[in-house]
Amino acid sequence: MNRFARYVLGLHVVPLLVGFGVITLIFALDFLFEYVDLIVSKGVPPIVVGELFLLGQGWMIALSVPCSVLVAVLMTFGRLSQDHEISAMRTSGVALLGVLLPLVGAAGLLAVGLTLFNNHVLPETNHQFANLMYDIGQKRPAFKLEEGVFLDDFEGYRLLVGRVNARTSRLGDITIYQLHADRLPTTITARSGQLEYDPREDAVTFHLQDGEIHEVPKEAALKDKYRRLVFRRHTLRILGVGQALRHTDRSARSDREMSTRDMRNALKGLDAERVEIQRRAMPLLSQYGYHSLDDADWVFQEGGPRPREPRFSALLALVAQLFQRPHPVPKPMPPGDQASLQSYLLQVRALDDQRWSYGVEIQKKFAIPAACVVFVLIGAPLGLRVRRAGPAVAFASLLFFLFYYVTLVVGEELAKHGHLSPFLSMWLPNLVIGGVGLYLTLREAEVLPR
């Protein structure tokens, strides 16, 4: 490492610490605005909210470090360009790549450390945070629910919620299985809902909106029938749940409370459960010409047999069909078999949603730290062009970080719904920004023509 490279590397220390402090402060203020009402509305002691704040530092650090790297690189190279130190360096025969390579190496070491943090420290802080929210949530049962995780604490019911707003107890993408000893479970799905807890009657009430109820009637005369009810509003009340809702010694963990090893083990369990469901469904599938539940899922939806809308454009769908096995044409089936097949498909879809969520979280633990290196590649050439460490640096930092964050969030949603692979959804921002940054860096280093 030459003397100028050590000099440039040292210039990054103060901007890195300042950027980290400012960005963490912004996250902290947003956190306090969101949770300070717990003191007023629920009478939570300030010391407990302070404990929540300390536990929330985990995810703040995970996001602040890459962004602070971008701020530091933009500020440092902007100053070097403004003071004509880059011109002096080039005049002295020092190559820009010779300065950048040690910086990329330092960013790589920082990325490794952040990866270890995300894999070992962050899951524990998230777990403790969730446990504390369980304690606070005794008056609001929505604090007990976790997005994308089955809840079976209610006797006779299994609950899966896609979105949870713990502050307002609003729920989204709700699936409730009401279990029966003598027939298939009743399946209740809803687009949204509100959760209320009545401690006096020890009951929880779900106010569901825009959903459907699928069940096989219990009456003997209707055993060969299948009932599908579409509702705009539906109320489900479950008694005797207070003990489950107050239980805070959680052994189960959501994907954000697990390490990579834990999630890989969980994926093996989900795969085994999916194989078992496939085995149980195989006699029914074979009877109607399906090779697997995936074949049936292609043409069979909640509303009955119908072709699934393509997830790709017409051209991509045509190309995809060239490499896919033709799907069987659905055969008419009695309501009882139709209900059984729907039950199997709903179970498999729920498992697939969990598998995608685990895959996204595994990739995220590596993709976000890798942004430290990516931001060096994009920050150095942009800093040389900005030339002024001021509002332009702040604007450029905000613009790229917002692009990175929005792309990450959109990719995560696409992956969790099966429209994009977990790897591509989490690494696409790095690939795009990194590719542009590498191109600009090579141009500034005069490796490529300007």
Image: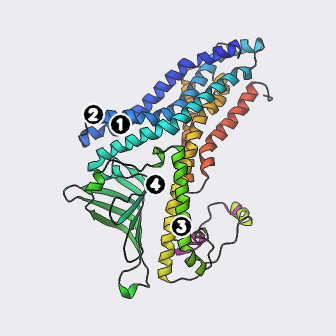
Is residue 162 in the magenta section? no
Is 36 placed left or right of 363 in the picture? left
Which residue, given by chain and number where applicable, does mark 4 sit on?
148
Location of residue 237 with respect to 416 vertically, above or below:
below
Q: Which colour scheme is used?
A: rainbow
Distance, label 4 to label 3, CA atoms, is 21 Å
Drawn side of residue 253 relative to residue 265, left or right: left
Tag 1 near tag 3, CB within 8 Å:
no
Extent of the magenta region: 296-315
The amino acid marked with disc number 1 is Leu
Please report the residue visible at 62 percent of the width from the left and 41 percent of the height from the top. Answer: 429
Report, in whole angstroms, how far the alpha carbon at label 1 lies from the one at label 3.
40 Å
Q: Name the mark on residue 52.
A: 1
* Image x and y of residue 186, in percent: 39, 72
Amino acid type indicated by mark 4: Gly
Q: In the image, is 142 to the left or to the right of 272?
A: left
The residue labelled by disc 3 is: 276
Residue 13 % position (x, y): 56, 19
Q: In this rendering, is residue 376 above or below 198? A: above
**Label 4–label 1 contact, CB within 8 A:** no
Element on which disc 1 rests:
helix
Residue type of the residue flagged with mark 2:
Pro
Percent position of residue 158, x then y: 39, 63
Residue at image mark 2:
46
Quadrant in which residue 173 is drawn: bottom left
Looking at the rendering, in which quadrant would you find the C terminus? top right
Q: Which of marks 2 and 3 is nearer the N terminus?
A: 2
Mark nearer the N terminus (1 vs 2): 2
Q: In this view, does 269 lie above or below 282?
A: above
